[in-house]
Amino acid sequence: MNKRAKQSLKRPGFYTASIACSLLLTQASFAGIVGVRSSGSGGKVSGQTSSSTTVTPGRAIEEKVEKREGTASASCKQDPDAASYFPLDFFSQIARDGSSLTFEQRADNKILVKMPASIDTCGKFKPQLVQDPTTKNVTIMMQMEDGKTYSQLLACLKEKNILVDDKIDHDKIPGKEYSEYSYVLDYSFDKDKDVKKTLKLSYGYPKAFSGKDGYPSTYGVDTDVELPSSLCMSAEKIQPQVTYLNKGQDVMIAELKEICKSGDAQRIAEARKAIGNADALKDIADKIKSELDAGYLVAVKQDVERINADMTKIEDRLNREKDSIDEKTAKDLTRKYADLAKELDSKFLNPAIYRLDNLMKERAALGDEDPKVKGIDEEIKKINEDVSSFSKRPNTSFASVYTVMEKFAITDSAKTVEDIRLKSYLYGKVYAGPTDEKRGKAVSFEEANQKQVAGMQKFDRVLNDWTDQYLVGKGNTYPLQKTEKERAASIDKMNKRWYDYQTTEQKNYQKYCSTGWTGSVVNPIQCQAWMQGADSRRNQELKKREKDLLFIKGRNDKLAKMTTNYNNYQKRQIANESRDAEGYEPYGSSYTSYEDNFAEQYPLYQGPQQSTAYNPYMYQMGGAQQAMNMGNAGMYNPQMVNPQMMVQQGQYQMPQMNQAYMGGQQMMWPSLQ
């Protein structure tokens, strides 16, 4: 017995469903005819011809069955021999390969009914369509074109020696006795008025064939579909699940609820995307999306736990092997870590932030006294905690990863991880209402985005430092020369700006506070106003100077680290040691004092005893002082410049005693020591 082809239904865009039925049924189960085929036979045989008859929509409409109510006792004959409509299973018996009717939903409210290569010796079949005017459900029935009843057809087949002992042996029937053809039927559906209606497609199963002497209903009957009693038909399913010509709002909502309850994050995400194309849900789409978003964030937790566990394994290994790991292994592990971060971002962070955005908008539209606010704030807080959890991984977790990425200048993975770390940190602070001490000062979505972009711009400069360190460790001295030039230029720029500031102050003092021939101030009002702004101007300039000094310190730290790396490179060259020989310092320098202070670059930093996302200070190796104390013969040892050095002769001198005298007026200058 061959398996029957599975039935399907093509939706708009030509998606097909084949109707599956048994190829060989035992006579003991019913009195219907049986199609017999040898194993492996099917398709067309030698000499077979097939015709294709396409019935136009106009003709199909002419054959349409009108719905007429009536009583079963008056119009329903239970005699299968007298039946003029045929059950679905019957067609698999007369088909060459055991397949059955195929239904395709086409555009413009059309259904294509295909008859497979079947015996047409005694005539062809034609479909008829009945549609409930209220529910719009569609049922298709099949009868012979010439109106033969079931018994008349069997008699003809026997006369032609095709049906022998209630069996049709397809292996003995020549191909010319078969043909395949199709019909097109129209049904009524107004996309604007009926879009929320659920339209089902079923096949009209003649009740006369039910029972032990009939053909079985392969997929059962859809009891929710009622047909006119005068037809004496049941609505037979054409595939295991119900077939829809249009899924209405009731069906779609029920399906979405089941998906949400499943806890399957992938299914929920796919359903969420599909809502945008569902016209039946347009008026409630936002509400459903919101519910699915919330359900997704719960369901995806299992994925998040798996990602975190995989990240921890990599972090632990890098922490153990950071001083001895080879470059290839380091790149492989950090790439996997970055891929996990991207998966976390895609599966959890982005959907969570999207949900957060919607909640913030919903809250903004409510008054503070609205009872819904409390529930929204609680959900926002939970999302903040979940989103920020990646950035709050333990110090050793992030440090081990960044240490190895810096050591081998693995910039691509570092960029990915840092970008997602910043996103995790910043959007964990997006909330409304009073300041929460645990979350810190609230930021808006726009501020979080701007800070993330700014953070990555700073990090790009850090990555340049990593590359320089790596190249110097390979014997390239260009980064050393470049960094020394940067430092020297910064010192010149700082001194010039300080000189210009003090020169301007002296000129303005003479301008506004000069004394006349009488020894008194010429314009005391202007002088007083200018003097009142002195502190503000001085503080502004000192802030600029402090930033310059911090940048110079960063250049000093970088030079110290590169000096150590270059010296180690020379040692390795002399001793012909391996690339990973002793002397390569552990993690630390590039982040320190780079233009802005560490707290600004890495806002999670709260001191060495606090749990932060990334705290490189714990891994410092001595910075500039270590480099300045070197100076071995033959080793590269750039001159380290004191950032508080005195300016060149001829420039205005910064007061040495923390005081300045200007025209008899004493002004205090805060120490930069």
Image: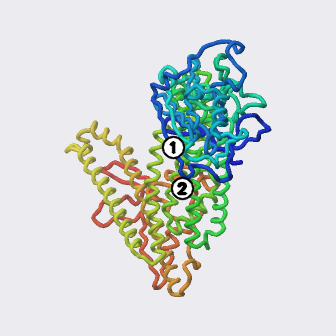
The residue that label 2 is drawn on is 417
Q: Is residue 79 left or right of residue 658?
A: right
Give residue 441's quadrant in the image. Answer: top right
Q: Which residue lies furthest to the bottom in this view?
A: 575
Q: Earlier in the sequence, mark 2 or mark 1?
A: 1
Residue 560 x %, y %: 48, 71
Mark 2 or mark 1, whichever is nearer to me:
1
| Image spot of residue 256 (x, y percent) | 62, 33
Q: Callout 1, which amino acid?
A: Ser
Residue 585 seen in the current view: yes
Inter-mark Cα distance, 2 to 1: 64 Å
Look at mark 1 in the image and give the residue it sits on: 50
User: Is 400 in front, or is 629?
Assistant: 400
Can you say whether 249 is above or below 573 in the image?
above
- In the picture as drawn, the residue positioned furthest to the right comes out as 28
| Residue 646 image-quadrant placement | bottom left
Q: Can residue 271 be seen in this view?
A: no
Residue 486: x %, y % from top left: 37, 65
Residue at screen point 64% across, 61% down: 315
Q: What residue is shown at x 51% (from left), y 37% (from top)? A: 181
574 is higher (above) or lower (below) than 93: below
Question: Is 320 located above or below residue 207 in the figure?
Answer: below
Task: Looking at the picture, tell me which residue is in the foreground, 673 or 623.
Answer: 623
Q: What residue is drawn where x is 38% and y is 48%?
A: 540
Q: Where is residue 378 in the image (x, y as percent from the top left)?
A: 64, 33
Circle 2 SS class: helix
State the mark number for residue 133: none
Q: How crowded is mark 2: few (under 14 residues within 10 Å), some or many (20 or more)?
A: many
Whether the residues at callouts 2 and 1 have beta carbons within 8 Å, the answer is no
Count the marks: how many?
2
